[in-house]
Structures are given as C-alpha cells and as structure tokens.
Image (cartoon, rainbow, N blue to C red):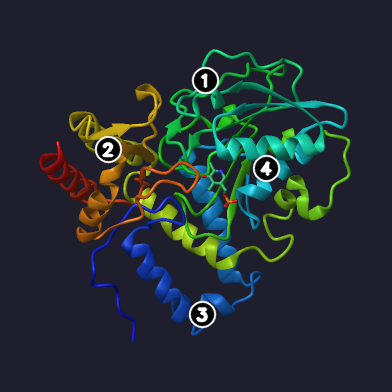
C-alpha cells in the first residue's frame, strides 16, 4: 500500500532537498507502473521509446524554461557537480592555455582546485578574506583566459550573484561558465551569455544522481586535448545524453519537477515566489536583531540559502528545541560554518517560512 506522510515537516534541507508533493506522488506511481505500461520506470531500457520521450522532454523543458538558444544542448550525467569541476577545465581549457575563476566559497574553491590539476588557473576575485560573506565586484577578467568560471549561488555561506559578471560580447568574449547548482530555475537568466551552465539536480531540480549540463556545442572541442568519451561533453551532446546509461530515474523525477515549474508559471514565477519567501525571513532576521543576526553582506544575500546566527550562541539548544517542536527540519548550518541555514528552494511553500518566522518571533520575545 502506498501511503503519503501524514506528518507535515517543513523541510529546509540544503540538498538533496524538498520537491513538490505532487512530484513525489507521480514519481512513486511510476515506480509501480510507468504510464500504464505494466512496467516500473526502474526496469525499462533507457533506449526504450517511453524513456527516450522522457529524456527528450526533460532536455526540452530545460531549454524552454531558461529560454536557451535552439542550438544549445542539454545532457544529464552522473558524478555530481563535483565531476563538473573536473569536466570544465578538460573541455574548455586549451592545452597550454589558462582559466579564470571567482572564488566565492567552498564549491568555487573545489572547482579551482580541479582546474589547477589541468593547467594555469588564475583567481581573479575572491571573498575568502571575509570568510566568503560577500560577493566580489568590479574585478577584471583577463581577455586571454579560455573561460571564466563562477558559482552563481554560494550554498554554504549564503551569498548570491545578483548581477552576472560580464565577459564581453562577440567573437572576443571570454566564454562564461557557471556552476548554478543551487539556484538554477530559481530566476530568469540569459543563457546566450553562457558557454556552459551546469549543476547537480538535487538542489532545485530533482533528486540526487543527475547533473545537468546546458551548453553551446560550438564552444566545445577546441582545446587540443584528447579526452575519454565519458569526460567529453561534446560526445555526450552528440549522443543526446545516451552515450552510456543515463541516470534514468533521476532524469524522470527532474522532468516531473520541470513540468511543475512550467505549470506554476515558469522561472519568472519562481523568482517572485522565492523573493517573497526570502523577504519574509530576512525581514525577521533584521527585525529581531540582536537576538538573530544575518551573516552575509545585505546586498549579496542569497534568496535560496539564508544563513544566520544567534546573538548568544549559548542559546542554541533552546532555539533548536523550539524549531524541532514546530516540525522544522534541516536548518542547522553547514558543518564547516555552524549557525543556521534555511534553504528555501523553489518547492518550499511560503507557509513553511512563516512557521520558522513565528518560531523566531517567539524565541526573541522570550530571550530578547
Ligand atoms: C552542492 C553543490 C555542489 C556539489 O554537488 P555534488 O552534486 O554533490 O557534486 C557544487 N556546487 C554547488 C554550488 C553546490 O551547491
């Protein structure tokens, strides 16, 4: 017997994270009987007609929702965004060339490490001097870099690029590459500005197990480097994400989430919905100062991951007891930074944010 959970948990997990309830229901149904076929989604061939349709639909929705140019390609691979950190220099840095990076946090740091394994890597901007609590601005990107890489949303420290770096336009532009793992589909972007956008599905698109790559195939294959076909983005694009067995179920559930985003009004509607949630929470953090304190520069605050601390850290056990009692889950900060982090991805309803704000108000009244 299938039973949905009866206990309403307000899930602030940073990833894997909350997905729409109707997606969970459709995904559960497909495990038992995929589209009335008498087969489970888990037991069909990735080369069967029904799965080919799922893949084509998922790829199409990625492009449609983000307004990507027609010739851009979408592939879903395993390995997480972390494998993407390695794929990027392999596929975009020329042999003997160089890459440029902005270092805005833990994930950017890891991406830079991978690039250094492949070749000359310059860090053109960094916010490490203040523990990544702001987004560097006004930096120069060398015109001779093979690409510039940045992380649009800093999931751990809670900062977000509100404006994307400009790497020039036309033939002389430095290819722009973005790890968009934790804010893809949360707001409109101009895909044509990017050579590659990639991200792990498990933050805002689906379950763990698939990584999406959206890219301009014309920008690939110019490095002079021989690649294993499994690490060659051009190959995966040419094979329409079927070079080897793709992460079938993760692609299916991502497709369901993308359908939900479309039904809700697309990424522009997500942006409005996410802005309302973020305002509700950040206003509370500011209003309830000094009991609560935000940890990042106000203008760079992430709409997805709000980080904050208690003015008096000794009060953490009392605060923890309160939010747990309210069925809130997943707001402890990343193990590397402590404090609190409320992740408010697309599927989190504003009602859940109100529950957290009510708990904070209550706590501030008792401890203020
Ligand atoms: C979570 C995260 C990653 C790592 O993703 P994996 O899929 O675990 O490899 C990379 N970048 C950002 C911005 C993230 O939030």
Q: Secondary structure at mark 2?
A: loop
Taking the view exactly as shown, the residue that stands out farthest to the front is 314
The mark lying in front, picked from 1 and 3, is 1
Q: Earlier in the sequence, mark 1 or mark 3?
A: 3
Mark 4 CB within 8 Å of ligand 1: yes
Q: Earlier in the sequence, mark 2 or mark 4?
A: 4
Q: Earlier in the sequence, mark 1 or mark 4?
A: 4
Question: Which residue matches tag 2?
Answer: 312
Q: Earlier in the sequence, mark 2 or mark 1?
A: 1
Q: Nearer the viewer, residue 353 or 205?
A: 353
Q: Nearer the viewer, residue 75 or 6?
A: 6
Q: Secondary structure at mark 1?
A: loop
Taking the view exactly as shown, the residue that stands out farthest to the left is 365
| Residue shown at the point (43%, 60%) measured from the top left | 256
**Which of the 4 image quarters holds residue 24?**
bottom left
**Mark 2 to mark 1: distance in Å?**
29 Å
Is residue 166 placed above or below 241 in the rendered structure? above
Residue 82: image location, x then y, percent: 64, 48
Examine the rendering and report whether any part of residue 231 can be seen.
yes
| Residue shown at the point (23%, 72%) measured from the top left | 6
The mark lying in front, picked from 1 and 4, is 1
Number of the label disc, if any, that sits on residue 136: 1
Q: Nearer the viewer, residue 325 or 368?
A: 368
| Residue shown at the point (77%, 50%) measured from the top left | 231
**Mark 1 to mark 3: distance in Å?**
48 Å
Examine the rendering and report whether any part of residue 33 can be seen.
no
Question: Which residue matches tag 3?
Answer: 40
**Mark 2 to mark 4: distance in Å?**
38 Å
Q: Nearer the viewer, residue 74 or 340?
A: 340
């Amino acid at each position: 017997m299938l039973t949905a959970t009866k206990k309403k948990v307000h899930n602030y997990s940073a990833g894997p994270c909350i997905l729409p309830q109707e997606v969970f229901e459709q995904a559960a149904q497909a495990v038992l009987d995929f589209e009335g076929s008498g087969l489970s989604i888990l037991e069909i061939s990735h080369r069967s007609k029904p799965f080919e349709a799922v893949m084509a639909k998922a790829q199409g929705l990625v492009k449609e929702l983000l307004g990507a140019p027609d010739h851009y390609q979408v592939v879903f691979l395993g390995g997480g965004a972390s494998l993407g950190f390695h794929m990027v220099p392999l596929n975009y840095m020329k042999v003997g060339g160089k890459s440029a990076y902005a270092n805005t946090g833990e994930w950017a740091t890891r991406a830079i490490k991978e690039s250094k394994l492949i070749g000359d890597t310059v860090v053109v901007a960094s916010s490490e001097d203040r523990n990544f609590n702001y987004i560097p601005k006004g930096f120069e990107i060398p015109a001779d870099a093979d690409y510039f890489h940045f992380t649009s949303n800093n999931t751990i420290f809670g900062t977000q690029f509100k404006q994307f770096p400009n790497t020039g336009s036309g033939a002389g532009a430095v290819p722009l590459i973005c790890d968009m793992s934790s804010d893809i589909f949360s707001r409109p972007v101009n895909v044509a500005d990017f050579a590659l956008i990639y991200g792990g599905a498990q933050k805002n698109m689906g379950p763990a197990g698939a990584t999406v790559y959206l890219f301009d195939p014309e920008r690939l294959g110019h490095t002079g480097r021989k690649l294993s076909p499994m690490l060659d983005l051009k190959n995966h694009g040419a094979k329409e994400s079927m070079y080897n067995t793709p992460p079938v179920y993760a692609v299916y559930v991502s497709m369901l989430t993308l359908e939900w985003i479309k039904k809700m009004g697309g990424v522009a509607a997500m942006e409005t919905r996410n802005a309302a949630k973020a305002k509700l929470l950040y206003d509370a953090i500011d209003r309830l100062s000094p009991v609560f304190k935000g940890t990042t520069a106000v203008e760079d605050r992430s709409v997805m991951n709000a980080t904050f601390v208690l003015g008096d850290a000794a009060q953490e056990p009392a605060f923890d007891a309160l939010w747990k009692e309210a069925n809130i889950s997943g707001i402890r900060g990343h193990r590397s930074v402590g404090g609190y982090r409320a992740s408010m991805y697309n599927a989190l309803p504003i009602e859940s944010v109100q529950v957290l704000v009510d708990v904070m108000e209550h706590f501030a009244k008792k401890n203020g």
